[in-house]
Amino acid sequence: MTKRVLWGVGSSRALRAHWALVFLGLDYETRPILTRTPAMETPEYRAVNPRGKIPTLIDGDLTLTESPAIVAYLAERYSTPERRLIPEALDQRALYFEWMSFISMELDATSLYVLRRHEGLPEIYSPAPEACVAARAYFERMITAATVRLEDGRRYLLGDDFFGVDILMTTVLDWAVNYGFDLPDAFAAYRTRIDEEPSTALAHRANTPP
Ligand SMILES: N[C@@H](CCC(=O)N[C@@H](CS)C(=O)NCC(=O)O)C(=O)O
């Protein structure tokens, strides 16, 4: 059997990888290292991920970082007719990758991660209050614009089926709520629906530090 190991627990990016693994019903071992702890600095982990970030997935001979890539890889490789995390139809897959890019770049990297760095970790990245005000306004604008896609009453981002992009979106929405954002109604209701997914609680349990 393929040896499958996931490094990292306790962060929103690690949660994405755990969630894909548990949704697909895959066996794996967890190395429960936490961000910004000495466990991230060990030679053993630096050999696995020289960038010193979590999560990192090892699946047989493949070592993979970047949580959206990990979710997409697991979805491509291990989806089955019963448990599918990425659509099969080309147009739907195009929309999957559009959501993946939008969530990773517009909601994560250029909005919430700016707040994480400059409000949450000013001693490392320096305070930048004006950039934080702009990042908050930008997140509000982007998430409000995205509600248009939910106007037809769909349950998930791509329709009636839960896919990997719903994992990514939920982690940024949770993160935004923790940072004091009031979500637009459509996304607050979407988040409630995701809470009803059986995999949600399993994923949070898998991502909880021991
Ligand atoms: N783009 C990466 C970001 C990974 C990342 O920044 N992970 C955080 C924890 S959520 C981390 O390891 N931070 C440690 C550091 O920046 O030194 C991904 O999506 O996996």
Image (cartoon, grey):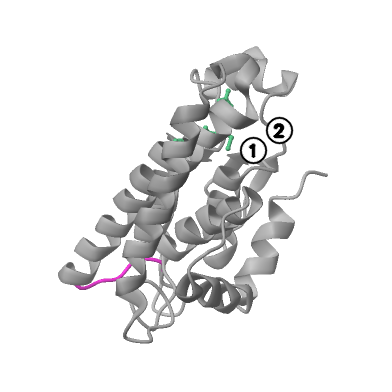
Q: What is the residue that sits farthest to the top in this orientation?
A: 43
Tell me residue 38's x, y (percent): 73, 18
Of label 1 and label 2, which has the lower sequence position?
1
Whether residue 5 is visible: yes
User: In whole angstroms, how far apart are the C-alphas of marks 1 and 2?
Assistant: 6 Å
Left or right of 62? Residue 4 is right
Q: Is residue 22 above or below residue 158?
A: above
User: Cβ(mark 1) to ligand 1 < 8 Å?
Assistant: yes
Q: Nearer the viewer, residue 190 or 167?
A: 190
Task: Judge the density around disc 1: few (<14), some (14-19), many (≥20) Cα neighbours within 10 Å.
Answer: many
Task: Label 1, secondary structure: give it.
Answer: loop
Q: Is residue 20 above or below residue 57?
A: below
* Residue under the image location 31 percent in, 86 percent down: 152
Residue at the disc numbered 1:
8
Task: Judge the density around disc 2: few (<14), some (14-19), many (≥20) Cα neighbours within 10 Å.
Answer: some
Left or right of 21? Residue 99 is left
* Residue under the image location 42 percent in, 47 percent down: 137
Magenta-drawn segment: 85-89
Residue 31 belongs to magenta span: no
Q: What is the residue that sits farthest to the right in this orientation?
A: 210
Left or right of 123? Residue 2 is left
Query: Where on the picture, by quarter, is residue 201?
Result: bottom right
Query: Where on the picture, by quarter, is residue 188?
Result: bottom right
- Does the CB distance between marks 1 and 2 fall below 8 Å? yes
Tell me residue 46's x, y (percent): 57, 17
User: Cβ(mark 2) to ligand 1 < 8 Å?
Assistant: no
Q: Nearer the viewer, residue 143 or 6?
A: 143
